[in-house]
């Protein structure tokens, strides 16, 4: 009997195997992606290939229903998953399951100088995107902080291409672990919001290759980014969403990018160029919210009917179409049809904790006279908190990175929580900033309306200072127009809304004034002498209040370092003329012309080389402990240095390596960051940090030969903890 059963089982198995439908290669998750791409492409009609290349709604593009190839869904943004919007509008759709974890904005992530945190950040935001069934995360942004006034500096990673490049790579890898494409933006030389859709950035090659491309190149060649977003502006008078030089020659040619180029929303502007110059997916054209919405608008996209017409009459070639379609299919087989399924997670405790940890690690202690921080408040004491940014919800607004969250802890709430039962925490408004309460129909629920005038507000704050052990002023910028916001640039470097007068008044009331500047970009601090302590806080996201208070109370020892220079005055910077910023009109040219005449001298490259004093330097940040650097050894290209915690509590230091150039035929910056390592040490503990200096680290880009050149000679090896705090120096020869 047993033999009969075994034979029957074998026979059944044979029959079932023989009749099982063979899975087409493109659906077979065990097959290499390129085989699946080729197989899928071979099955598509011309119309189906074209349909892959352009939006069908505000944030999605078509798949191939006939073959079961799914649609591609994109989502903003770089620091959280945007609430679901209407099919064809910017306004949110009113879903009730899309309140995300708001992570800190990316200038905060950059300020951590911590590659491991960047990987964690990318991994977790990628989990949130995957859980929300999104295939492309429209972020991170890595445009260089060329002017402190750029409205979107808060979304980017500072003024130095090496720091931005080192920090973007782990973020991209983390996102893409989840089968979600990171779409690195905005490519390229998109360094302002003023007239962003009608200004040509005119940049020499050396500046382009040394300053504005490296972070994008790192994201592609080291991070393996699956998508790049073309920017709204023009580069040398061709729109970047279909710029032949940037997309075909550099991105896809020199860097071998095999992913998709996605337009910014409405960034595609021309039928012929969109067909020919490296654009693979077109979004945002002709839809509500950007411009007119003619009927049948999605078929009027440049890569829709106009492209089909060009393919049929021979003005566009099928090989280019197949390349575009193959890239989109590759994106699909990397994401929603990946060989291994991904599920993600959403608003889980780990994500909230990571948001808090990253925000704290990015917080920068700029000044701490007499050690007034961490807060030392006697039992039954009193803390006066002054400033709108102590209470204002900051995850709402700012443009496309606008988020909806279940909660957002503000600094006042966190202080009241931390000192409950220990000290009285009172709040005064101090000034009126932005009383707006919603963006894209995401509502903060806050009523910040105010009837008192500026003098009364200051008088009330001063009166409340009576008996306070500490005064903590929490101000800075916000996400409204002409602040840290997409679509507009700031109009001044100083704090707006009369905040300086408030700070100066409070300085008369205490010898323990802590000023917290919350912003995503540099803010002038002419009031610096008024404050015993100054903290650079960021848009820290859902857990921002907790993160800031963790640092103020000493629960977390600050270790953030500035990712950009804080100048004394705007006019000290390298942008001296209108043609440099924000651009000028020129006869015969339809778009504004902006010339990057300052060349590579951006940020500390400018201030250090020209020996211009600044308020706080790139790379600066203090700790509640102290560190020493010693034993610098330079042997060939190997550099080592010992860092020791010489204080009384655990902390982290960022050891920074700068290279000073050998003399050569071009003017080079006095120093350039070429290495950094964040080291956590217990009191008394030390560690040897090691760097290897490559030829690339010594090189400048020689435009005539189109080559990186490391001129022979002696180079300075500068080791420090800020660009203006070089502690040890050595040399090496090339
Ligand atoms: C916006 C932004 C871009 C964003 C896109 C979609 O205009 O420039 O960063 O991802 O459109 O919202």
Image (tube, rainbow, N blue to C red):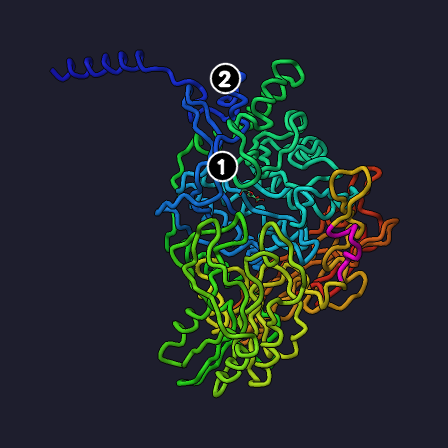
Q: Choose top left, top right, bottom left or bottom right for residue 494.
A: bottom right
Q: CA distance from mark 2 to mark 1?
A: 24 Å
Q: Main secondary structure of the magenta part?
A: loop
- Up/down of 592 relative to 674, above or below: above
Q: Choose top left, top right, bottom left or bottom right for residue 476.
A: bottom right
Q: Which residue is mark 2?
A: 44
- Up/down of 527 relative to 28, above or below: below
In the rendered structure, are the residues bearing label 2 and label 1 in contact, judged by CB atoms less than 8 Å apart?
no
Residue 577, given in percent of the width and then of the height, sits at 80, 55
Which quadrant of the frame does ligand 1 lie within? Answer: top right
Q: Quadrant of the N terminus?
A: top left
Q: Residues within 10 Å of mark 1 (few under 14, many from 20)?
A: many
> Which residues make up the magenta segment?
573-582
Q: Which residue is mark 1?
A: 58
Query: Residue 717 lies in magenta, yes or no?
Result: no
Residue 46, given in percent of the width and then of the height, sits at 54, 17
Residue 402, given in percent of the width and then of the height, sits at 49, 51
Residue 195, given in percent of the width and then of the height, sits at 67, 47
Q: Compare marks 2 and 1 and give the one earlier in the sequence.
A: 2
| Residue at disc 1, secondary structure | loop
At horizontal 46% and vertical 58% (from top left) the residue drawn is 437
| Residue at disc 2, secondary structure | loop
**Ligand 1 has an atom within 8 Å of the beta carbon of the residue at disc 1:** no
Compare residues 625 and 108 and report the one nearer the observer: 108
Query: Residue 576 lies in magenta, yes or no?
Result: yes
Q: Is residue 640 visible?
A: no
Q: Nearer the viewer, mark 2 or mark 1?
A: 1
- In this view, the residue farthest toward the left is 1
What mark, if any, has residue 233 been given in the picture? none
Q: How many marks?
A: 2
- Up/down of 312 relative to 684, above or below: above
């Amino acid at each position: 009997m047993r033999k009969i059963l075994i034979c029957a089982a074998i026979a059944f198995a044979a029959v079932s195997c023989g009749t099982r439908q063979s899975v087409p290669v493109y659906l077979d998750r065990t097959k290499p992606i390129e085989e699946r791409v080729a197989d899928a492409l071979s099955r598509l009609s011309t119309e189906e290939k074209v349909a892959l290349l352009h939006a069908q709604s505000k944030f999605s593009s078509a798949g191939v229903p006939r073959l079961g190839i799914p649609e591609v869904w994109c989502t903003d943004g770089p620091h959280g998953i945007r609430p679901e919007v209407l099919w064809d509008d910017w306004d949110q759709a009113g879903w009730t399951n899309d309140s995300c974890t708001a992570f800190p904005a990316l200038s905060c992530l950059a300020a951590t100088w911590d590659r491991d945190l960047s990987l964690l950040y990318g991994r977790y935001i990628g989990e949130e995107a995957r859980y929300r069934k999104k295939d492309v995360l429209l972020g991170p942004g890595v445009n260089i902080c060329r002017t402190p006034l750029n409205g979107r500096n808060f979304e980017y990673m500072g003024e130095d291409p090496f720091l931005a490049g080192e920090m973007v790579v782990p973020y991209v890898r983390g996102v893409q672990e989840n089968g979600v494409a990171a779409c690195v933006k905005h490519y390229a030389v998109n360094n302002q919001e003023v007239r962003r859709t009608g200004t040509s950035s005119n940049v020499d090659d050396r500046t382009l290759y040394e300053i504005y491309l490296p972070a994008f190149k790192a994201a592609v060649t080291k991070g393996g980014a699956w998508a790049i977003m073309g920017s709204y502006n023009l580069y040398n008078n061709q729109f970047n969403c279909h710029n032949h030089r940037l997309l075909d020659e550099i991105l896809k040619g020199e860097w071998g990018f095999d992913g998709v180029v996605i337009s910014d929303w409405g960034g595609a502007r021309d039928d012929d160029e969109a067909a020919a110059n490296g654009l693979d997916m077109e979004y945002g054209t002709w839809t509500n919210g950007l411009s007119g919405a003619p009927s049948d608008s999605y078929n009027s996209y440049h890569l829709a009917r106009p492209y089909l017409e060009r393919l049929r009459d021979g003005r566009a070639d099928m090989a280019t179409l197949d390349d575009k379609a193959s890239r989109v299919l590759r994106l699909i087989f990397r994401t929603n049809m990946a060989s291994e399924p991904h599920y993600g997670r959403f608003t889980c405790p780990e994500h909230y904790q990571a948001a808090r940890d990253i925000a704290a690690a990015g917080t920068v202690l700029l000044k701490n006279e007499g050690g007034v921080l961490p807060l030392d408040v006697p039992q039954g004491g009193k803390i006066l908190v002054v400033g709108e940014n102590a209470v204002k919800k900051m995850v709402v607004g700012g443009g496309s990175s606008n988020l909806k969250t279940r909660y957002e802890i503000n600094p006042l709430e966190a202080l009241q929580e931390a000192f409950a039962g220990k000290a009285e925490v009172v709040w005064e408004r101090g000034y009126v900033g932005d009383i707006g309460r919603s963006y894209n129909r995401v509502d903060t629920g806050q009523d910040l309306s105010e009837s008192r005038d500026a003098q009364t507000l200051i008088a009330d704050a001063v009166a409340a200072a009576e008996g306070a052990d500490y005064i903590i002023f929490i101000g800075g910028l916000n996400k409204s127009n002409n602040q840290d916001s997409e679509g507009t640039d700031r109009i001044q470097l100083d704090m707006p809304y009369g905040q300086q007068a408030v700070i100066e008044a409070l300085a008369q009331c205490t010898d323990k004034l802590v000023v917290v500047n919350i912003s995503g970009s540099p803010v002038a601090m002419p009031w610096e002498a008024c404050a015993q302590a100054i903290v650079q806080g960021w848009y820290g996201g859902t857990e921002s209040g907790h993160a800031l208070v963790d640092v103020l109370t000493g629960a977390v020892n600050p270790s953030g370092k500035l990712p950009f220079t804080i100048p004394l005055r705007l006019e000290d910077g390298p942008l001296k003329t209108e043609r440099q910023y924000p651009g000028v009109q020129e006869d015969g040219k339809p778009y504004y012309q902006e010339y990057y005449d300052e060349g590579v001298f951006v940020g500390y490259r400018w201030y250090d080389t020209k020996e211009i004093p600044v308020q706080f330097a790139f790379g600066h940040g203090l700790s509640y402990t102290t560190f020493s650097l010693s034993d610098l050894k330079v042997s060939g290209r190997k550099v080592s240095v010992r860092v020791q915690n010489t204080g009384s509590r655990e902390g982290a230091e960022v050891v920074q390596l700068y290279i000073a150039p050998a003399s050569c035929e071009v003017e080079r910056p006095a120093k350039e960051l070429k290495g950094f390592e964040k080291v956590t040490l217990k009191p008394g503990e030390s560690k040897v940090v090691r760097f290897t200096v490559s030829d690339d680290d010594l090189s400048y880009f020689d435009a005539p030969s189109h080559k990186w050149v490391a001129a022979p000679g002696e180079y300075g090896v500068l080791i420090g903890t800020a660009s203006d705090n070089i502690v040890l120096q050595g040399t090496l020869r090339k």
